[in-house]
Image (cartoon, rainbow, N blue to C red):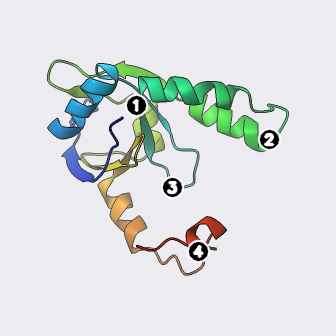
């Protein structure tokens, strides 16, 4: 299965349309015939998540199965399921990002599309570069990362 890697600077027009870069578009065509699901990231980072439809359909039952009497689980369900927007790339390889998702992620003209393996992230360019500049000295390293050698 293809994996999404790399970062792409892209633009969004005033109507909220953006063109998926050719290399990513080709992978999406192979994986899911260009059918994707765009949703809000549940983290405080306020970007959007883009899943190929089969990947989303594997994840969705796990989200739905969370105990909705738990406040954190309910919030996650509301953000991910409540903002999920199934869509298909048009003949020009474009998608139309719904206004609610554009607002949530503070998306304007300049964007960054970031490969994350099985999914993609869509960021405001300004927020992406600000996030890169943030110091991570305060972040606690999980045990799984202690043996990782880059």
Q: Residues within 10 Å of mark 1 (few under 14, many from 20)?
A: few
The residue pinned by badge 3 equals 45
Q: Position of residue 93 (x, y in %)?
A: 19, 27
Q: Is residue 84 left or right of residue 6?
A: right
In the rendered image of this protein, does residue 44 appear above or below residue 66? below
The residue pinned by badge 4 equals 146
State yes or no: discs 1 and 4 in contact (Cβ < 8 Å). Answer: no
Tell me the mark number nearer the camera, choosing from 2 and 1: 2
Along the polypeptide, which appears first: circle 1 or circle 4? 1
Question: Which secondary structure lies at badge 1?
Answer: helix
Q: Gap in Å between the C-alphas at discs 1 and 4?
A: 41 Å
Along the polypeptide, which appears first: circle 4 or circle 2? 2
Q: Gap in Å between the C-alphas at discs 2 and 1?
A: 26 Å
Q: Position of residue 128 (x, y in %)?
A: 36, 59
Tell me the mark number nearer the camera, choosing from 4 and 2: 4
In the rendered image of this protein, does residue 132 appear above or below residue 41? below
Along the polypeptide, which appears first: circle 4 or circle 3? 3
User: Front-most of 66 and 145?
Assistant: 145
Q: Residues within 10 Å of mark 3 (few under 14, many from 20)?
A: few
The residue pinned by badge 2 equals 71
Q: Gap in Å between the C-alphas at discs 4 and 2?
A: 31 Å
Numbered marks: total: 4
The residue pinned by badge 1 equals 99
Q: Position of residue 55 (x, y in %)?
A: 47, 29
Along the polypeptide, which appears first: circle 3 or circle 2? 3
User: Front-most of 25 and 17?
Assistant: 25
């Amino acid at each position: 299965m293809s994996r999404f890697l790399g970062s792409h600077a892209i633009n969004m027009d005033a109507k909220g349309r953006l063109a998926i870069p050719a290399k990513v578009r080709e992978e999406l065509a192979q994986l899911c015939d260009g059918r994707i699901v765009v949703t809000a990231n549940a983290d405080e980072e306020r970007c959007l998540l883009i899943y190929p439809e089969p990947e989303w359909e594997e994840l969705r039952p796990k989200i739905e199965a969370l105990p909705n009497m738990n406040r954190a689980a309910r919030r996650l369900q509301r953000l991910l399921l409540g903002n999920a927007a199934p869509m298909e790339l048009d003949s020009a390889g474009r998608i139309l990002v719904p206004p609610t998702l554009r607002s949530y992620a503070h998306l304007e003209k300049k964007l960054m599309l970031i490969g994350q393996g099985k999914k993609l992230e869509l960021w405001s360019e300004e927020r992406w570069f600000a996030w890169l500049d943030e110091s991570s000295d305060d972040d606690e390293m999980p045990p799984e990362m202690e043996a990782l050698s880059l």
